Image (cartoon, rainbow, N blue to C red):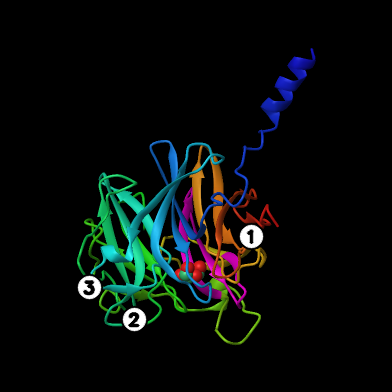
Amino acid sequence: WAARITFAASALLPLAPAMAANPIVQTIYTADPAPLVHGGRVYVYVGHDEGDRKFFDMRDWHVLSSTDMVNWTDHGARLSLQDFRWAKKHAWAGHTIERDGQFFWYVPVEQASGGMAIGVAVGPTPLGPFKDALGKPLVFDRQGDIDPAAFLDNDGQAYLVWGNPTYKWVRLNRDMLSFDTTVGDSGVMRHPMTVEAFGARAKPDRATAYEEAPWIYKRGSRYYLFYAAGPIPEHLAYATGPSPTGPWTYGGVVMKTQGGSFTNHPGVVDFHGRTYLFYHDGSLPGGGGFSRSVCVDELQFNADGSIVPLDMSRT
Ligand code: FUB
């Protein structure tokens, strides 16, 4: 009888998923997570904090993966500054997306000629091998060209979004290596930086709370734009809209400032029927703003589609 009660209770109350001990990798410092689900496995493309911890000294990107969100494998550095002839430094926050059996890894780097620009590497599997697809930047808009994230909508149209301090995007062509230059400013579109879209800022150094690290996620027919919000130290916030290009309406705080890193960076993905938020903190020994660690926690939604704010599970 007791066994029957237990069965009935578990049928009514979904069991909490087993979760990794955060941070998910504890042997190196990792940052800027970008999850991708492929073939029953979640891959997370991360930056790698190194150096003297006085700035974002980052030279390569690692791929992590798991089949259960608990046990994680670090597949090592799968892309580095050296893979881009035209790059000098700053292997910052990237994002990988699959289309037609090819994996496109968009990354921002500082060019040898100066200025951050966004390049793209392509490979035949989620682990590569990845090669610079263009031999030059895909995007160089001359201001704040960091933190690219791609989104492929159900209608087959793909987008690349990025930017700090302005939120920008292009409509990617089917090859994922070029974009529609007939719209916007030679293809680059800029969302009006309004409080209605991105929320009010607690400091007048910028017009809105939007800082950087945009991430688009679709749930039903609703689009969510997650982003790192300011002032520094960052928190995570979101907006919703009727299309992948907005117009966006500010939704609220997803994760307040915490965790010992003055930046944060969202990556949201569905896996086995649940939704997960990847982010980073400074919680490993020796951790901080330039020695960060990627973590994951489950994200919950209210019935009206709004997001239940969550705390870092390690904090
Ligand atoms: O990792 C370098 C920078 O820190 C990223 O571009 C930002 O999103 C912040 O996480």
Give whichever of discs 2 and 3 has the lower sequence position: 2
Separation of residues labelled 3 and 1 (CA atoms): 50 Å
Mark 3 closeness class: few <14, some 14–19, many ≥20 residues within 10 Å? few
Mark 2 closeness class: few <14, some 14–19, many ≥20 residues within 10 Å? some
Left-right relation of 240 to 190: right
Identify the amino acid type marked 1.
Pro
Q: Is mark 3 within 8 Å of ligand 1?
A: no
Q: Is residue 132 above or below residue 209?
A: above
Residue in front for this viewpoint, 114 or 219 = 114
Separation of residues labelled 2 and 3 (CA atoms): 24 Å
Taking the image as drawn, is residue 149 in sight?
A: no
Taking the image as drawn, is residue 302 in sight?
A: yes
Percent x, y of residue 7: 70, 20
Which residue is at 66% across, 56% downward? 312
Q: Mark 1 sits on what residue?
A: 285
Left-right relation of 299 to 99: right
Percent x, y of residue 176: 26, 58
Which residue is at 48% across, 72% downward? 56
Give whichever of discs 3 and 1 has the lower sequence position: 3
Numbered label attached to residue 149: none
Q: Mark 2 sits on what residue?
A: 115
Main SS, magenta residues: strand
In the rendered image, residue 216 lying in the magenta stretch gets the answer: yes
Q: Mark 3 sits on what residue?
A: 182
Q: Which residues are magenta?
A: 210-237
Residue 182 location, quadrant: bottom left
